[in-house]
Image (spheres, rainbow, N blue to C red):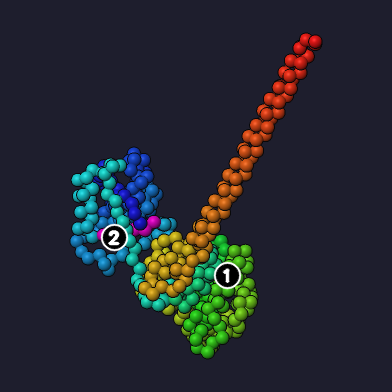
């Protein structure tokens, strides 16, 4: 990213970015083309700072650390509202931040004298494969839309790109580890809860769908090369059909979901056994019809620990090789990001003729230019011939009129001539 630096020299209290920038930015003519706003760390959480910067028109937030310490292992915590933010934020050291501010003060930026910055977001690179992981709850349309659009790119990348699916649940605010009482919108006596949505109005069903999807993912991905007849396409087919037939139509229930499992090409009894085995308890405990709402679950426990290790706080989240991806979820953008994270790029990353969303490929642009050029040449020739024809018609008309005038004059001359 490239942009011009903006720092609030006139409003010292808001150099921390904890207040709205609206009044300041309305008075400052540089805001429209100065998208990188720099603020100091402290006084409020980073999410609030970045949100204020985005609302002020900033394209990126630069936060200066408030202590003289290494920042390599530090990260900006999310207060739970990070999903509302769409611009990137970076944390820089106190020393680097002071250099920027001092230079900014000394140069007194105006439209002809501004500090131009470039921000690069590095991705962990691997030789032959890139791992991209999605963290979400199964009631989020954004993820299904992405998977539907990205499927063609996944096929192009093949084994060079490996999808990971992870499911997020939250403990009930008054969860009691010793309780065996079902809790609304939860499994595991309140250990695995999800807030109901407009598409699925029961949080417990969403949590149970998480387990089901993880089981399908395991059969499709993790067992593919272990004498297992199922392929990765099974999971993609299930997700596509589930959203179109059950979730987007607000008709989700276990019957609808189970029917999609069968139509996707996987045996329902295998998935049911996987779900049952994931709950911690003996056969007697699992005879209870409410055992899913009471017993702990190994799959959801593993998902929680994985999320904790990766510091995932917002939902949905996409990571590439373990690094948070903060860009657009447009399929072609993610495709480019996956290619950029590979040292040995597959041919698909250089393949010509891939029609990306929102634009045309090189050959398509060339063809369009040639067609337009041909049309213009044809129009030029037609216009030229038309003008030439009109000129000739005019010349012929003038010539005929001239002959008529000569004939008339000759006639009158002969008429007026006295006879002998």
In which quadrant is the N terminus drawn? bottom left
- For label 1, the residue is 240
In the figure, is residue 11 to the left or right of 279?
left
Instruction: Give the dominant element type of the magenta stretch: helix, strand or loop.
Output: strand
- Helix or strand or loop: what does disc 1 sit on? helix
Whether residue 299 is visible, yes or no, is: yes
Give the answer, above or below, for where 409 lies relative to 202: above
The image quarter in which residue 350 lies = bottom left
Image coordinates for residue 157, horizontal then vertical, percent? 47, 73
**Magenta segment range?**
87-92
Q: Which mark is residue 91?
A: 2
How many callouts does the rendering have? 2
Q: Tell me if mark 1 has few (under 14), some (14-19) or many (20+) residues whose alpha carbon lies within 10 angstroms of its own.
A: some
- Helix or strand or loop: what does disc 2 sit on? strand
Image coordinates for residue 293, horizontal then vertical, percent? 52, 76
In the figure, is residue 51 to the left or right of 136?
left
Give me the C-alpha separation between circle 2 and circle 1. Answer: 38 Å
Residue 69: within the magenta?
no
The image quarter in which residue 238 lies = bottom right
Q: Residue furthest right?
A: 420
- The residue shown at (53%, 70%) is 151
Question: Along the line of sight, which residue is nearer the eye, 334 or 237?
Answer: 334
Q: Which mark is residue 158?
A: none
Image coordinates for residue 341, horizontal then vertical, percent? 38, 70
- The residue shown at (56%, 61%) is 198
In the figure, is residue 203 to the left or right of 414?
left
- The residue shown at (30%, 48%) is 6
In which quadrant is the C terminus drawn? top right
- The residue shown at (55%, 67%) is 148
């Amino acid at each position: 990213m490239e942009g011009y630096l903006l720092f609030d020299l006139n409003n010292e209290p808001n150099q921390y970015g904890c207040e709205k920038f609206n009044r300041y930015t309305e008075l400052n003519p540089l805001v429209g083309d100065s998208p990188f706003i720099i603020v100091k760390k402290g006084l409020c959480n980073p999410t609030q700072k970045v949100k204020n910067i985005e609302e002020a028109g900033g394209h990126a937030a630069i936060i200066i650390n408030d202590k003289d310490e290494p920042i390599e292992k530090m990260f900006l915590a999310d207060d739970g509202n990070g999903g509302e933010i769409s611009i990137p934020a970076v944390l820089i050291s106190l020393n680097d931040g002071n250099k920027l501010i001092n230079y900014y003060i000394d140069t007194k930026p105006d439209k002809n004298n501004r500090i131009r910055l470039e921000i690069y977001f590095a991705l962990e690179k691997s030789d032959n494969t890139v791992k991209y992981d999605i963290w979400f709850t199964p009631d989020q349309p954004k993820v299904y839309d992405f998977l539907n659009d990205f499927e063609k790119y996944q096929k192009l990348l093949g084994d060079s790109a490996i999808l990971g699916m992870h499911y997020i649940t939250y403990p009930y605010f008054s969860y009691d580890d010793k309780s065996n009482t079902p809790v609304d919108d939860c499994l595991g006596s309140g250990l695995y809860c999800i807030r109901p949505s407009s598409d699925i109005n029961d949080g417990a069903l969403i949590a149970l769908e998480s387990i089901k999807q993880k089981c399908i993912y395991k059969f499709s991905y993790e067992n593919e090369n272990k004498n297992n007849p199922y392929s990765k396409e099974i999971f993609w087919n299930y997700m596509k059909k589930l959203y179109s037939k059950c979730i987007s139509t607000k008709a989700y229930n276990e019957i609808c979901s189970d029917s999609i499992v069968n139509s996707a090409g996987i045996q329902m009894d295998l998935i049911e056994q996987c779900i049952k085995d994931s709950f911690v308890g003996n056969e007697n405990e699992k005879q209870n019809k409410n055992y899913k709402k009471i017993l702990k679950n190994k799959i959801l426990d593993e998902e929680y620990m994985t999320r904790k290790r990766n510091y995932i706080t917002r939902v949905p989240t996409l990571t590439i090789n373990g690094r948070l991806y903060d860009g657009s979820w447009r399929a072609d953008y993610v495709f480019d990001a996956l290619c950029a994270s590979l040292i040995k790029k597959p041919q698909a990353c250089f393949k010509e003729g891939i029609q990306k969303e929102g634009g045309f490929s090189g050959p398509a642009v060339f063809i369009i230019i040639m067609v337009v050029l041909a049309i213009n040449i044809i129009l030029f020739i037609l216009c030229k011939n038309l003008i030439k024809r009109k000129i000739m018609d005019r010349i012929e008309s003038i010539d005929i009129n001239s002959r008529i005038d000569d004939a008339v004059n000759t006639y009158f001359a002969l008429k007026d001539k006295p006879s002998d």
